[in-house]
Amino acid sequence: MNDRRVGLGVDAHRFAPDRRLVLGGVVVPHDAGLLGHSDADVLTHAVCDALLGAAGLGDIGTRFPDTDETYRDASSLNLLAEVVAALAESGYTPVNVDVTIVAERPKLTPHFDRMRSCLAEVLKIESSRVGLKATTTEGMGVLGRAEGIAAMAVALIGRARPGPCT
């Protein structure tokens, strides 16, 4: 691939009772989920935005608006699959993604292998090309007070340019 682009995605959602916590397509045991129109998977949403941004295809809010009932409680992995399809239509494919999740609770690293596997399958890349990290804000701000979770992702996409003899 000799045409590569980089994109950045950021998402944050507050905790909400009576919802399940979904991150990277994995249900994580916790006393609250995240508030959102879809399953509110901040990790996957950040990846979607990073990929869309890299390809110049807008953002997740424009592509999957919260005013469209089609996306109510939708699996964010399904949204990611639609993003990967849109990239393919534009001639791009994901090369790798790297995500940092900011959360005081719950502990997320025990779930990283499953998250990495779910994301890699939808992205159609090796799981070694999905970087996952978690951090806290050491009690500072809304995330430090455990009012929600945020995620930041960077994605590299690429496409092969036709050579001079093609």
Image (tube, helix red, strand yellow):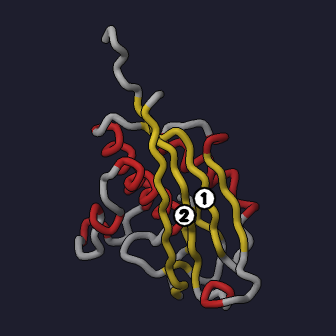
Q: Look at the image and tell me whether residue 78 can be seen.
A: no
Q: Residue at x 60, y 36 (%)?
A: 126
Residue to which mark 1 is pinned: 99
| Label 2 environment density (alpha carbons within 10 Å; few <14, some 14–19, many ≥20) | many
Q: Residue at x 66, y 72 (%)?
A: 29
Q: Amino acid at mark 1?
A: Val
Residues under labels 2 and 1: Cα distance?
Answer: 7 Å
Q: Residue at x 48, y 48 (%)?
A: 6
- In x, y percent, where is residue 36? 41, 78
In the rendered structure, the answer to whether residue 153 lies left or right of residue 144 reads left
Which element type, helix, strand or loop, lies under badge 1?
A: strand
Q: Is residue 120 above or below residue 73?
A: above
Residue to which mark 2 is pinned: 43
In the rendered structure, the answer to whether residue 27 lies left or right of residue 158 reads right
Q: Quadrant of the C terminus?
A: top left
Q: Look at the image and tell me whether residue 28 can be seen.
A: yes
Q: Quadrant of residue 67?
A: bottom left
